[in-house]
Image (spheres, rainbow, N blue to C red):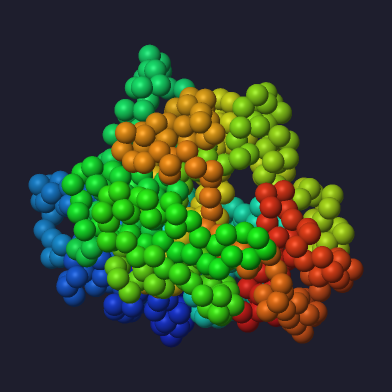
Amino acid sequence: MCGLSGELRFDGRAADVDAVVRMTATMVARGPDGVGIWASGPVAFGHRRLRIIDLSERGAQPMVDSELGLTTAFNGCIYNYQQLRDELTAAGYRFFSTSDTEVIGKAYHRWGVHCVDHFAGMFAFAVAERDTGRLVLARDRLGIKPLYYAVDAERLRFASTLPALLAGGGISSDLDLVALHHYFSFHSVVPAPHTILAGVRKLPAATVRVVEPDGQYTDEVYWSPSFTRDDAYAGWDAGDWQDAIAARLRTAVRRRMVADVPVGVLLSGGLDSSLIVALLAEAGQTGLATFSVGFEAAGGESGDEFAYSDIIAEHFGTDHHQIRVPGSRLLPAVDAAIAAMSEPMVSHDCVAFYLLSQEVSRHVKVVQSGQGADEVFAGYSWYPPLADVPREAAVDAYLSVFADRPHRDLPAMVEPSYLLERDASRDFVAAHFAHPGAATSVDAALRIDSAVMLIDDPVKRVDNMTMAAGLEARTPFLDHELVELAAACPPELKLASGGKGVLKDIGRPLMPVDVIDRPKGYFPVPAIRHLNGPFLERVREALFDPAAKARGLYRPSWVQSMLAAPNDNRTTLGANALWQAALLEMWLQTHGLT
């Protein structure tokens, strides 16, 4: 888990090493254990290292393999790297390190762009070919690791974070109007390749891009579950599905213990993280460090779920850390979390994850986390209403329960110069739902959520906030083999028991039922959900900042109406509409975009 950056020139000039140094310097938090810069003619790489596998200097990056003529920069973890290393050794390759980075380079040499088909893990990497001048960029199947880029006629720059590209220079502050529409309508999710800035793009998940020395490129999408019923499972009953999914989940959890440092668990007290702890205990793991976070109550809402996380910690005898965050730390953490965001992210969970990660990183460098289970196993409230909706009506039904606000409401909120005539968010959803596969409306919703929403909301949130503390988060529910099996599973088994039915059935013989059958919870940060006092003042300050006035994004009448009733206006899924608007301005101002 690290931060990478780089540049490829198309105009015959040498790479701008100073720009790569600046980009790399912004990612110290992602990789506090080492820095490396490499340049050769038109290409340069930068890397910040978090030492997880092969703690020696032999694992440092960018990693140059002179024998093969390849240089690799990598962010993430290849969980099956040891098995691949054995396979490559048998094929005649010689290794000079014990790192997964070197496995990537040699796997690319052996299998070309199809090396990604052999990887089980989370990754974003760049490989430069010495002899051809070609650059290869790739991203993992579920988009767990980010990769941003900016390109013009002269050069391509890329980095693990958007702010790193800003540090490199030459990025316009113009907003991308399609992204802006998604931000306000599509639950603040901005699908790849768009970002909120017109001059920055992100490589889509499950994509390998091969860039030629002149800037021409080709993309290959190498993975996409169909969400249809597979004939291979035609005779399975509910028990067969439960056994198969449990076996895949056990493998996923075991894979994510691969490290040369201790691995802990973020224990929220919900089903997903509790199930990870239960499976590790079943496998004989002892002395497991677990971590929970809680905040002060506000607006009549509790700020912690310690009652549930304590049950699991006591039941399995973990080395549990209950982190209580005083109210005095919240307001400074808001700005710190926004600074850590590669893109504006509305969820107040960001602040919770930021503070939790800062504390957890004092104890361990790697944790497992339960993100992804809701999108893969139908845990959200918007799935059950779709169960009886005909497939041809799925688009409108999905948007009615998921979208923050309809297209027709945007003119009252946003100034005309920032509006699109077309409903970009509905167009996007309709195009996605029209792809082959996804047999039912629930399948279609699960497919778009796991391929789009998951990547550009909860997964991005976890990456940004944990890496701001130099903490590597691993997500077993996003193991690609588990996701493939879940996609083929009949929706009714996932919707059972109020959602995630098959996971609940797996958990019943393993852990206390009080945690399994509890109401669904979230990372609660009540002070942000219920804006008042200094938090409301911070919102007001952002919306009336000179940069905000110069930008002229929001209609003044809309801003005044929101401030008059800051907690009365919420999106379809309950987010504070005023916070959503202010968060975007805070992010733009924090990153110097005026």
Q: Position of residue 88 (x, y in %)?
A: 16, 49
**Which quadrant does the N terminus fall into?**
bottom left
Indicate whether 6 appears above or below 80: below
Residue 326 vs residue 358: left or right? right
Viewer can see residue 142: no
Q: Position of residue 57 (x, y in %)?
A: 18, 75
Front-most of 436 and 397?
397
Residue 188 vs residue 458: left or right? right
Residue 190 vs residue 582: left or right? left
Front-most of 556 and 534?
534
Front-most of 510 and 62?
510
Please report the residue visible at 52 percent of the width from the left and 40 percent of the height from the top.
379
Please report the residue visible at 15 percent of the width from the left and 46 percent of the height from the top.
87
Indicate whether 8 appears above or below 461: below
Viewer can see residue 274: yes
Residue 64 vs residue 203: left or right? left
Please report the residue visible at 36 percent of the width from the left and 22 percent of the height from the top.
239
Residue 466's quadrant in the figure? bottom left
Q: Residue furthest right?
A: 557
- Label total for image: 0
Front-most of 25 and 583?
583
Please report the residue visible at 17 percent of the width from the left and 52 percent of the height from the top.
82
Indicate whether 422 appears above or below 439: below
**Which quadrant does the C terminus fall into?**
bottom right
Q: Position of residue 391 (x, y in %)?
A: 65, 26
Q: Position of residue 463 (x, y in %)?
A: 45, 62
Indicate whether 543 appears above or below 489: below
